[in-house]
């Protein structure tokens, strides 16, 4: 699976225009290989973030070649950063990943790792973080490897209250995972997902995500 993480700088006066263009992405719901796309506003920074999931890099390349430019619109943003990464771990929860995109909240931890820390980092995602989040009500999550020892951990939650209850356990879990040894810097994002930005892939017979 391929993760696509998009960050947009949007002036306050252009928010309505940007939101309108995000609604138009629903036309790609029939694109082969799309798992789904969600997004929302980061209230701390005022930026907009969008997370897209694709079954594989080839499907995404076909979309870029054949369809992206016909759908894309500047949409009022003044800056955009797009990063791609292969999903190295799917964290099971209360729903399959494709259904978890219907959740109300997305938590993203954008982590830069120390040299040689990748193996331990992924082990503790699997053995410490994933079970704790699943027991706390997480719908599903993914870990994606980006360039330069950068990993994106994205988890889907039914609502903000469920995530808040889990967040009370984070200091304890950080100690168990030795997070300060693995991670040199981290940027966190908590996004209440905008329902009208959600793109639900049209399922085909035999699709599994």
Image (cartoon, rainbow, N blue to C red):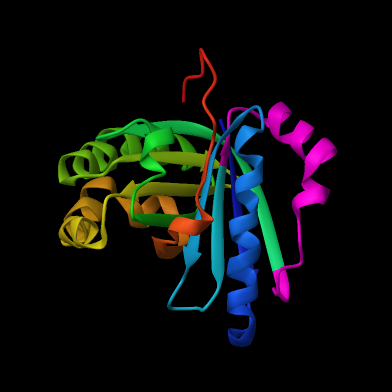
Residue 154: percent from the left, percent from the top? 43, 48
Residue 198 shown left or right of residue 67 in the figure? left
Q: Residue, x 20% and y 42% (percent of image)?
A: 132
User: Nearest the camera: 123 or 63?
Assistant: 63
Residue 105 shown left or right of residue 174 in the figure? right
State the residue lying farthest toward the top. Answer: 206
Q: Is residue 31 above or below residue 138?
A: above
In magenta, the rendered stretch is 53-79
Residue 51 shown left or right of residue 191 in the figure? right
State the residue lying farthest toward the bottom. Answer: 13
On the question of residue 147 being in view, the answer is no
Q: Quadrant of the N terminus?
A: top right
**Could you say which quadrant of the image residue 121 lies in?**
top left
Residue 116: percent from the left, percent from the top? 51, 41
**Could you say which quadrant of the image residue 54 lies in?**
top right
Q: Is residue 194 above or below residue 83?
A: below
Q: Is residue 60 covered in magenta?
A: yes
User: Nearest the camera: 185 or 6?
Assistant: 6
Residue 67: percent from the left, percent from the top? 79, 41
Q: Residue, x 66% and y 27% (percent of image)?
A: 32
On the question of residue 108 being in view, the answer is yes
Residue 113: percent from the left, percent from the top? 50, 51
Residue 78 shown left or right of residue 162 in the figure? right
User: Nearest the camera: 120 or 161?
Assistant: 161
Q: Is residue 76 above or below residue 5?
A: below
Q: Is residue 43 above or below residue 196?
A: below
Q: Number of labelled discs?
A: 0
Q: Residue, x 78% and y 31% (percent of image)?
A: 62
Q: Is residue 17 covered in magenta?
A: no
């Amino acid at each position: 699976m391929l993760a696509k993480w998009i960050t947009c700088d949007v002036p306050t006066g252009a928010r309505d225009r940007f939101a309108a263009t995000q609604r138009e992405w629903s036309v790609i719901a029939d694109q082969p290989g799309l798992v789904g796309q969600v997004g929302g506003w980061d209230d701390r920074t005022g930026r907009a973030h969008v997370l897209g999931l694709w079954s594989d890099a080839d499907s995404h390349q076909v979309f870029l070649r054949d369809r992206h430019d016909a759908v894309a619109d500047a949409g009022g943003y003044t800056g955009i950063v797009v990063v791609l990464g292969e999903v190295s771990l799917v964290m099971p929860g209360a729903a399959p990943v494709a259904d978890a995109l219907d959740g109300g909240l997305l938590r993203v931890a954008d982590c830069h790792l120390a040299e040689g820390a990748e193996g331990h980092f992924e082990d503790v995602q699997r053995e410490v973080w994933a079970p704790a989040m699943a027991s706390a009500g997480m719908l599903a999550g993914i870990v994606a490897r980006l360039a330069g020892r950068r990993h994106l951990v994205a988890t889907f939650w039914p609502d903000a209250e469920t995530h808040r209850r889990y967040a009370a356990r984070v200091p304890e879990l950080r100690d168990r995972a030795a997070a300060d040894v693995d991670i040199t810097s981290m940027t966190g994002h908590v996004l209440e997902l905008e329902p009208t930005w959600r793109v639900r892939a049209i399922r085909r017979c035999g699709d599994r995500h």
